[in-house]
Image (cartoon, rainbow, N blue to C red):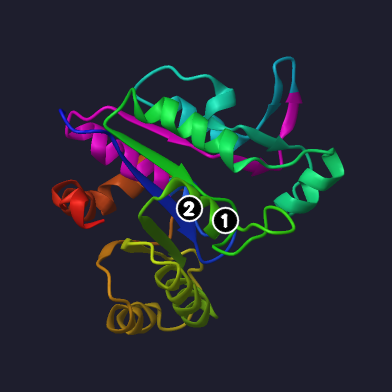
Amino acid sequence: MSQAGRGVFVTGTDTGVGKTQVTLGIMLCLQSHGLKVAGMKPIASGCWRTEDGLRNADALSIQQHCSISLPYGDINPFAFESPIAPHIAAEESGVAISMVAIAQAYQRMLRQVDWCMVEGVGGWLVPLSARHTVADLAQCLALPVVLVVGIRLGCLNHTLLSVESIQRGHLRLLGWVANQIDDDVARPERNIATLREWIDAPLMGIIPPQPVPSADAFAARLGTGVDALINKDSSTW
């Protein structure tokens, strides 16, 4: 494509709501259109030690699904061993999470591909330091947002608060994904219908309960939403 690559920030209503699978699913959908795609998970806690350094399962999955070969350090610039809140993990490791370093890695990727997906960590307002949150990272990268909603008890409040915060930060909410992570939740279809009424952004896809979540299964449910994303005029983002 002749224009500069596009980027999207994937966030969630909480941790464990399926951000990585949605990220991978969108990547697969974009690749099915012949587009060159990269992805990154700038900050990851819950990593294990290898000969090459700390590694995170989600970040490795993103690396494997990129259209081009990219160094792990660009995909996951800040990796922490302890599976705890990132600002605590960073403090205990004596590391300061740098927005500048993340932005530089992102720009290196964007110069090589048509689309770059950036997955956040935890929810929208998870602290990254004493002064910055995930929302500040999306602001720093100036990216439009896709919100992954975990359909479970409490999701209405969590979702509407997240949407309000995204819009108050003057970022574009491109769309949202309803991921039915709790197959025991009562009235999931009513919850989704309520959110459709309240969210002024398109529902990109509904993911049914997945005994074994896979990128292919998510991509199959996100195809129509991603088509709309591709066709959206980036000047309106």
Does 16 sit left or right of 142 as displayed? right
- Residue 219 versus residue 183 in the image, above or below: above
Callout 2 crowding tier (Cα within 10 Å): few <14, some 14–19, many ≥20: many
Left-right relation of 2 to 136: left
For the residues labelled 1 and 2, say whether their Cβ atoms are less than 8 Å apart.
yes
Q: Nearer the viewer, residue 58 or 167?
A: 167
Quadrant (top left/top right/bottom left/bottom right) for the N terminus: top left
Residue 57 showing in the rendered view: yes
Numbered badge on residue 111:
none
Q: Is residue 28 magenta?
A: yes
**At which x and y percent is residue 24?**
40, 41
User: Circle 2 sits on which residue?
Assistant: 138
Query: Badge 1: few (under 14), some or many (20 or more) residues near its Cα, within 10 Å?
Result: many
Whole-percent x, y for residue 10 in the image: 43, 52
Point out residue 64 in the picture as x, y percentages from the top left corner: 45, 25
Q: Is residue 47 magenta?
A: yes
- Where does the C terminus fall, quadrant-wise? bottom left
Residue under the point 23% across and 49% down: 226
Residue stretch rendered in magenta on the structure: 22-49
On residue 134, the disc is: 1
